[in-house]
Amino acid sequence: MRVAVIGAGVIGLSSALCIHEQFHGLVPSLELELYADCFTPHTTSDGAAGLWQPYLSDLGNLQETLWNKETFDHLLRHLHSPAAQEMGLFLLSGYNLFTEPVPDPSWKNIVLGFRNLTPKELELFPGYSYGWFNTALMLEGRSYLPWLTNRLTQRGVKFFHKKIESFQEVGGDGVDVVINCTGMRSGELQPDPELQPGRGQVIKVLAPWVKHFIITHDVKSGIYKSPYVIPGSEFTVLGGIYQHGNWSQENSAQDHKTIWESCCRLLPALQKAKIVSEWSGLRPSRPRVRLEQESIRHGNVQGEVIHNYGHGGFGITIHWGCAMAAARIFGSILQERGKVGSSPQPRL
Amino acid sequence: MAAPKVAVVGAGVIGLSTALCIVETCPSCSVTVLSDQFSPNTTSDVAAGMLIPHMYPGTPIHVQKQWFKETFTYLFAISNSAEASEAGIHLVSGWQVFKSTPKEELPFWSDAVLGFRPMSEAELQKFPQYQFGQAFTTLKCDCPPYLLWLEKRLKTTGVQMYNRKVSDLWELHSDYDIIVNCTGIGAHQLVGDKKLFPVRGQVLKVYAPWVKNFIRDGDGLTYIYPGIHRVTLGGTREKDNWSLSPDSGTTKDIFDRCCSLEPSLQEAQDIKVKVGLRPSRQRVRLQKEVLSQGGVKLLVVHNYGHGAGGFSVHRGTAKEAARLVGECIGALQGSLSGAKL
């Protein structure tokens, strides 16, 4: 049984790993191949700071909240494992700041130690009158993606550096199932007007004295349009740009100015931070994640595609829950085809 | 009277912060710092510089609380300014965990730090051997940066600093009107204070930049304090041990204890070992003394014996010492104008 995963960002790699972990024992003929024209460190996932935090509101999408929780719990279980450091996984505490009281987020009981900020803490952030403190997780793409790649390579998954132009290109060649994890460029394989770029720009600096994430919110403007500071294991990421519909991946001087000035106002000590690099990326934004099966014809043959794209700015936050959901869909495809018994017990 | 000449002996966090307070409260004073050690070779440089107070059995709690609050407020303002990184001051959050619930669930300083609260069940799950814990946010003074920043501020106000070993306070009486004794463990020899004793601490300073939260065992013996560039792993509390040599068995023991609190530390790199002697005393010696020899008087203000809590109370005790120096100056001026001392 041949399975082709398209895309080598966090979604593609984790979907491949999850499927292989659960089914290689049940399906001895399982052959997993991964196709992408872009690998770490050049994917969208590599540009992200790597902080686990969903958007403020789940918009009633409880399934996504559940996938977020599954991801957090999965990562938390790995925190004390010897692999944690190699994965780029560590705990990080910090602040979410608002100019007015807001309802508690859907994830308040998923993270650790969620609470409101005290008046004294708010003194640190003039202009903000309300906020949260909690401990969450960091999962740095530049470590996690290579780690996932190593696990897949160890399992015999084959990687192909190739731009796929159509589902038929991989589907026709004896591949039974295609997993579509192409993120922002899914529209090139199958038009999807709901998928739009949410352009972001970030400045990476050296500011090792910053030990907390600080995310400000301007509820009227929308997510990520307000400054944020996220300290990684080596660099600190400054951001606060979200431009819906902007496909440019060139760094903008105006955006640089916006980010730098607003972050330095938030944390005056950043004025002394050394700038290391700058990056723009396109969040693959969609009103909801597309995670579903679709049958696609290649001539006489019907192939199955499992779509797993449209994770916006919360790909890392939701990735494992989505990988598990994709694996469940894969399991049901296997069942339909009689490849496994009626109720497969996936091995973890 | 000509500008009073004040000599501050000692250039650790106590000496430098006291000198700075004296300059701030008495601009007309001429202040000189004398020490046989400067950063990075002081006891302060070994310490992590965490603002978590130590309890002095002989000092009233309200006084300790006052000292801590003053220190916290002072450093809080710096951490919030553009100078924070140069001064080495930064906020850090974390957990203090206890294997069994302590008698006192609320330490005296719980309302002086930020966001103090008991840990949740979910948070405690990260520490399987521990029953109870407290989460809070506090400040950390990284050394050498903090000491170097204090030195820089002193220099801009015209304070001279000299590398000199003072073996006897009387060496200074002809050049200075008031001596401020901030010699830490050195006071044992310098003024023969037998109530002062070392509590040896060995620490590891390691490269583990993914550790962003502090973790402290409530017994005070095992702790993980992330600094700007390095994480301090500790430690030991060895009373009356004067040895400044690192002990390799102790190094392994500290590393093992810290790894059981935070397993990812197994991947820590470039382990450096340091030893400091906490200048310990029942109570901080913060008082005036008039020494007398052959009809000559020498005014001394003592500010030493901060033990494990130097950073936590340094600004508070420095301000009090400066106040005592002010009293000495008042007395000197009084005696010059005929009033009795």
Image: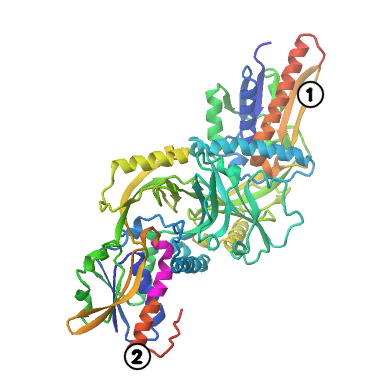
The answer as to whether the residues below labels 2 and 1 share one chain is no
Three-letter code for the amino acid on which mark 2 is drawn: Gly
Question: What residue is drawn where x is 41% and y is 59%?
Answer: A140
- Disc 2: which residue: A338
Residues shaded magenta: A315-326
The image position of residue B278, as x and y in percent, is 68, 44
Chain of the residue under the numbered disc 1 shown in the image: B
* Residue assigned mark 1: B290
Does the magenta-highlighted stretch encompass residue A27? no
Instruction: Measuring from the top left, give residue A217's x and y in whole percent.
Output: 45, 48
Residue drawn 45% across and 61% down? A58
Counting other residues with Cα less than 10 Å from the Cα at mark 1, is it few (<14), some (14-19), or many (20 or more)? few
Residue pictured at 64% horizontal, 50% vertical: B116
In this rendering, would A90 be left or right of A293?
right
Residue B140 sits in which quadrant? top right
- Look at the image and tell me whether residue A172 can be seen: no
x and y percent of residue A56 in the render?
Answer: 46, 56
Q: Residues within 10 Å of mark 2 (few under 14, many from 20)?
A: few
